Image: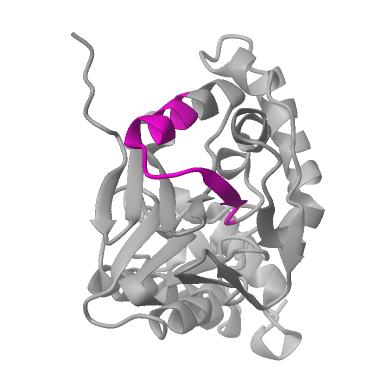
Amino acid sequence: MPDLTPRFQEVAPRVWVAHYDWMHVNITLIGGSDGLLMVDTHGSAAQARVVADDVRRLGAGPLTGLVNTHEHWDHHFGNATMVEQFGDVPIHATEWARDHIEESAGRTFESYGQQPDHPRREEILATTLHLPTHTFSSAVQLDLGDRAVELIHPGRGHTAGDLVVRIPDADVVLGGDLVEESDPPFIGDDSWPLEWPTTLDLVIGLMTDATVVVPGHGQVVDKDFVQDQRIELGVIAETIRDLASRGVPQSQALAQGEWPWDPERLESAVRLGYEHLPRSQKRLPLI
């Protein structure tokens, strides 16, 4: 017999989270009297059809809107499928994310196009982009009927266009990839490692001690977890500043720094950190 247990699990009143093994992605549904708001849509059209089936199995109401937490493919490649399955619903994102989705997706398609043996190659390349339709720059409130949901751009971190979702009446915050549980947060070529800690400070300011925090990847966490992750990101940022101020060249920074994570994960962080530092915080090495 097939397993009929709903994949979406209620983590707070009318807030359901489904965790998918592929990339440990989380998809969240927020219920209101007008219907369901879905946050992120997964990494391919094929996987999004699985998510759509899980939404129907939950049976909590019609899907009336989508949110993309940022422009990376694993959070929006399911957009077109959701529109096909549930109708032409509004899709919300920051202006930055909407303006950079096509560029970011192009890099993804190019990367998987060069991996002929990757098991997910064909399904990723078969994905059709569907851009967000509703954008904002700093914050916006969505009306779900008997519930208000806040979308907030707290600053630059994982990308320049991250948003977090706050559900005040349920005391839930969805962190996108500003918070990750399955691995340390990914600092990539479009991240802002020096600003990420202060961006998380604003996110933490949205929380109470009892807040349920849903990361972009991994298991549901709490405020203490986010504070610990902020400390680690802060150590990375301050180590970069310290090394640069002492004249340590970028090429030697990974070897000379004392890092909270495996240095191999921090190549982009160091390169970007050195690039983003103002000249006043860099000391040129003596020749």
> Residue at horizontal 35%, vertical 41%?
18
User: Is-magenta flag for residue 163?
Assistant: no
Q: How many marks?
A: 0
In this view, the residue in front, 81 or 148, is 148
| Residue 269 drawn at (x, y percent) | 56, 61
When the figure is inspected, residue 38 is found, relative to residue 194, above or below; the finding is above
> Residue at horizontal 56%, vertical 44%?
75
When the figure is inspected, residue 211 is found, relative to residue 15, above or below; the finding is below
Task: Say left or right for 142 vs 280.
Answer: left
In this view, the residue in front, 254 or 182, is 182
When the figure is inspected, residue 48 is found, relative to residue 92, above or below; the finding is above
Task: Say left or right for 73 vs 15.
Answer: right
Task: Say left or right for 276 vs 9.
Answer: right
> Residue at horizontal 31%, vertical 76%?
227
Q: Residue furthest bottom?
A: 280
| Residue 186 drawn at (x, y percent) | 49, 52
| Residue 238 drawn at (x, y percent) | 47, 80
Here the colouring is one colour
When the figure is inspected, residue 187 is found, relative to residue 142, above or below; the finding is above
Q: Which residues are magenta?
A: 50-69
Res. 249 visible in picture = no
> Residue at horizontal 21%, vertical 19%?
3
Res. 191 visible in picture = yes
User: Is-magenta flag for residue 65?
Assistant: yes
Place residue 79 in its image quadrant.
top right
| Residue 111 drawn at (x, y percent) | 68, 28
Q: Residue furthest left?
A: 1
Position of the N terminus by quadrant: top left
In this view, the residue in front, 126 or 274, is 126
